[in-house]
Amino acid sequence: MHATANAYIIVPPRNTTGLEGSRVHLDCEAAASPANITYQWFRNGVDVRLVPGLMSRAQIATDGALVIVRALRDDTGWYRCRPTNGIGRPPDAEAYLNITCKYTVQL
């Protein structure tokens, strides 16, 4: 008989600042037994898959990270990672993503 345990977060996401147009990476690594972990991400409480336009520029990697390939200022907000293996209440961890832009001043 194998012990089963719900997922727990090993590497939580960290507050991150990225430049508009750049690639942004939010970590979220978890462990569990059994290790059939799936990851769900939320932006400001909304599943990222339901945020208009976001998933056309982003993906959830197999290690749980949320990778935004081309960040926009609208991507700024609170991001919550929730890993689960279907056992127990899934944990979650949150971090703030701030996207800044380069301004050019023309005289």
Image (cartoon, rainbow, N blue to C red):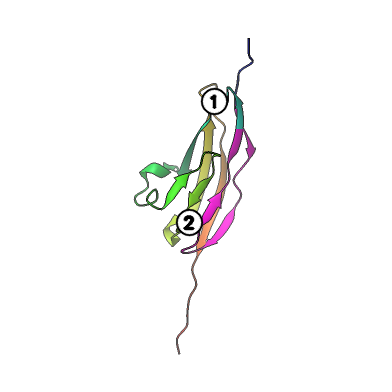
- Residue 104's tag is none
Name, please, the residue furthest toward the front.
62
Q: Secondary structure at mark 2?
A: loop
Residue 33 sits above or below residue 57 on the image: above
Q: Amino acid at mark 2?
A: Thr
User: Where residue 66 appears, x then y in whole percent?
Assistant: 51, 46
User: Badge 2 local density, few (<14 within 10 Å), some, or many (20+)?
Assistant: some
How much space separates mark 1 and mark 2, taking CA atoms? 28 Å
**Of 66 and 94, the residue lying toward us:** 66
At 48% from the left and 56% from the top, the residue drawn is 76
At 52% from the left and 38% from the top, the residue drawn is 62
Q: Does the image show residue 66? A: yes
User: Badge 1 local density, few (<14 within 10 Å), some, or many (20+)?
Assistant: few
Q: Amino acid at mark 1?
A: Arg
Label 1 vs 2, first from the N-terminus: 2
Provide the residue designation for mark 2.
76
User: Where residue 72 appears, x then y in whole percent?
Assistant: 43, 60
Do the residues under discs 1 and 2 have CB atoms within 8 angstroms? no
User: Where residue 29 appears, x then y in whole percent?
Assistant: 60, 38
Q: Secondary structure at mark 1?
A: loop
Q: Is residue 10 magenta?
A: yes
**Start-end of magenta stretch:** 7-30
User: Where residue 77 appears, x then y in whole percent?
Assistant: 49, 53
Provide the residue designation for mark 1.
89
Q: Is residue 97 magenta?
A: no
Please give left or right for residue 55 compared with residue 11 in the image.
left
Quadrant in the picture for residue 9: top right
**Quadrant of the image containing the C terminus:** bottom left
Q: Does the image show residue 44? A: no
